[in-house]
Image (spheres, helix red, strand yellow):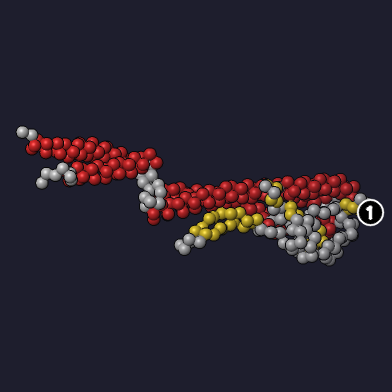
Amino acid sequence: MASIMTNASALTALQSLNATQKNLDTTQSRISTGYRVSQASDNAAYWSIATTMRSDNQAMSTVSDALGLGASKVDTAYTGMSSAIDTINKIQQKLTASYGQTDASKEKTQTEIKALQDQLKAYADGATFSGTNMLSVNSGTATAAADVKIVSAFNRSATGAVSISTIDVNVESIKLYEAGTTAGTQKGILDANYVGATGAIVGTAQNPTLGAAAAAGDTYSVAGLKIFDSATGKGASDTQIAEMMNVVDTALKAMTTAATKLGAAKSSIDLQKTFTSSLMDSIDRGVGQLVDADMNKESTRLQALQVQQQLGVQALSIANGSSQSILSLFRG
């Protein structure tokens, strides 16, 4: 039926052309943005997942920075500890050399030991990074030094709850000096009071009388070790020097253990940093699988739609022209 009121062919061609134009707009948007899902209306589920994972990735980027900062803190403490170990070995050598020597020789050796003790304190005080010092601490009113917590992971559970994991460095077990004076506070490795005979740490000092035989319960600290007393003019007896050597050796073992703990913490941080970097890359790939556009596919689709558009325009033109043929029916 030919009608001048309704052109069914033109309507069909127009609908087809509009559908082609809509698909063409979608394809052009994907090519220009690079995303198959760039907003929630494209695919609500994929967009929600991608948005959440991108947020998590940004949080993990901050975790990576925190791990780098933590590694620097541990490196600084390890450097100070390593230098202190070298220095305490020199103190041990001085004590060995002073065994059996005269008081005059011990007086000279004491000057060298004092210089080494000052160097130990300088190493501990200088091992500070970003306001954190694990070797020379002041616990204040607390009876133990607080752990250094290094953010190591950002976690999201299956229910969507988030949590933070940390790598903890136990400062109490590695500190060399403790300035806190609260009752019950444990001193550091170098300023603690060691019983000369056993190497056990005690809270109350029992200072030896230099020049006399070692007494039961005499205590020594590496930080305050003296083999010559300028006030009395007396040097330590050989039995006292032997106990000092035992104390220094005990402290050296504790420092070696502390350095091992710092090394283990540094290794854990490095491993976690590598894992975090790999995890971020995996999340990026996963998000890309959900929302990225396949440019090869979209390019081919664009060419096909452009041809369809041209054909649609031609079809609409033909449909509109069909109405003109009705005029010929009324020509004489």
Determine the residue located farthest toward the top in the rendered image.
332
Quadrant location of residue 308?
top left
Instruction: Say which residue appears at 69% left-offset and 49% top-offset.
Output: 131
> Horizontal placement of 297 versus 145: left or right?
left
Amino acid at pointer 1: Thr
Q: Is residue 7 above or below residue 272?
A: above
Instruction: Say which residue appears at 81% left-offset and 45% top-offset.
Output: 115
Q: Quadrant of the C terminus?
A: top left
Residue 148, given in percent of the width and then of the height, sits at: 65, 55
Residue 86, given in percent of the width and then of the height, sits at: 71, 47
Whether residue 230 is visible, yes or no, is yes
Residue at the spot of label 1: 232
Instruction: Say which residue appears at 16% left-offset and 36% top-offset.
Output: 321
Of residues 33 and 145, the one drawn nearer to the viewer in this rendering: 33
Within 10 Å of disc 1 (Cα), the crowding (few <14, some 14-19, many 20+) is few
Q: Is residue 126 above or below residue 237?
A: above
Instruction: Say which residue appears at 74% left-offset and 58% top-offset.
Output: 139
Residue 207, given in percent of the width and then of the height, sits at: 86, 60
Determine the residue located farthest toward the left in the rendered image.
332
Residue 255, given in percent of the width and then of the height, sits at: 70, 54
